[in-house]
Amino acid sequence: MSSMLVVGSVAFDTLHIAGKSHERVLGGSATYASIAASYFTPVQLVGVVGRDFPDDAVQLLRSKQIDLAGLEVVDGETFHWEGRYADDFTSRETIRTDLNVFADFEPKIPASFNDAPFVMLGNIDPGLQMQVLDQIKKPKMVLVDTMNLWIDIRQDALDDLLKRVDVLVLNDEEARQYTGEHNLVCAGKALQQKGPHTVIIKKGEHGAILFQDDQELFSVPALPLDEVNDPTGAGDTFAGALLGYLAKNDDISHEAMRRAIVYGTVVASYCVQGVSTERVAKMTNDEIDARYAWMNRMVSF
Ligand code: AMP
């Protein structure tokens, strides 16, 4: 079993979903990814919060055995993101992004973390993601997650970063925006040309496609759910569980990656059923196994 380093945002989110508002609930790319990965392997988190970050959130992360030696607590307020979802969940709008303590964040990787073999660069400014890579010894696998904001305003930094990462995870809209290719197969191949040997394009409720080296494409559907309450963090939990599974088995083969994508899909399916991190934090390994078996039955013919 190998440890996994997660860097990203630790946040308060204000969410507007189906006519209801959820004020300042726990969120952030690193929060979701760490919780998801913790079901598979020991996790080390690097991020920053303000003095307003509540003790029960710290306790929640600790209860998942997440090593918080890299979580800085500084004067100021915690990063705050506010978003509103369309009623059918097919799109969301960012209403505000208050960087707060993130504005001056310079990730510092504790010496005890810098040889982590599996590294997830969760969604933050690609310049900060690069600073993390500069501080760690040669990992076995580096996965990077990003979002439309950075493709819009930091494309050069993202291009530089991609030359140094193994796995890129992004959604279909971002893949199209980044490459200018409408066809997702063409977009996936164009993204591989930018550096990562592996590209995973998420398609929300339609699943995900894996492009790896010149292997045959692999595509999984999402699990069909009759109840979705909050899609926030689905992408981060998908990526966190996926890399956590690879780290657990210390296996980066193509076959392991196919299984990892199924685990990512399963964990994301729990995430979207609760608001904020509540459901994914309460998940059990038996529940993960049950939906993994469901996926297996669902796609076999
Ligand atoms: P996802 O739904 O997987 O895209 O992730 C949503 C999470 O990303 C939320 O919990 C937010 O706190 C976090 N987030 C939103 N915008 C940013 C940003 N600009 N930088 C870092 N994290 C962000």
Image: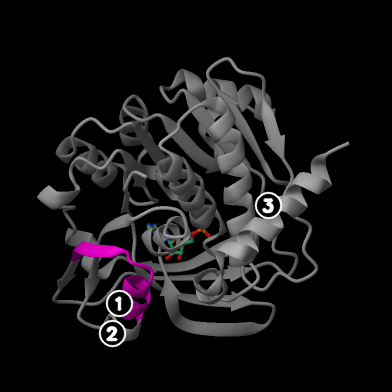
In the shown orientation, is residue 276 left or right of residue 49? right
Q: Who's the residue at 53% across and 83% down the image?
A: 22
Q: Residue furthest left?
A: 111
Does the magenta run of residues contain 136? no
Q: Secondary structure at mark 1?
A: helix
Magenta region, residue range: 57-71
Q: Is any atom of residue 91 visible in this view? A: no
Q: Who's the residue at 24% across and 65% down the image?
A: 68
The answer to whether 229 is drawn above or below residue 22 in the figure is above
Name the residue beneath numbered marker 3. 292
Name the residue beneath numbered marker 2. 55
Does the magenta run of residues contain 65? yes
Task: State the separation of the CA atoms marked 3 and 1.
Answer: 29 Å
Depth check: give the residue in front, 165 or 139: 139
Q: Whole-percent x and y of residue 219?
A: 70, 34
Task: State the separation of the CA atoms marked 3 and 2.
Answer: 33 Å
Q: Whole-percent x and y of residue 218?
A: 67, 30
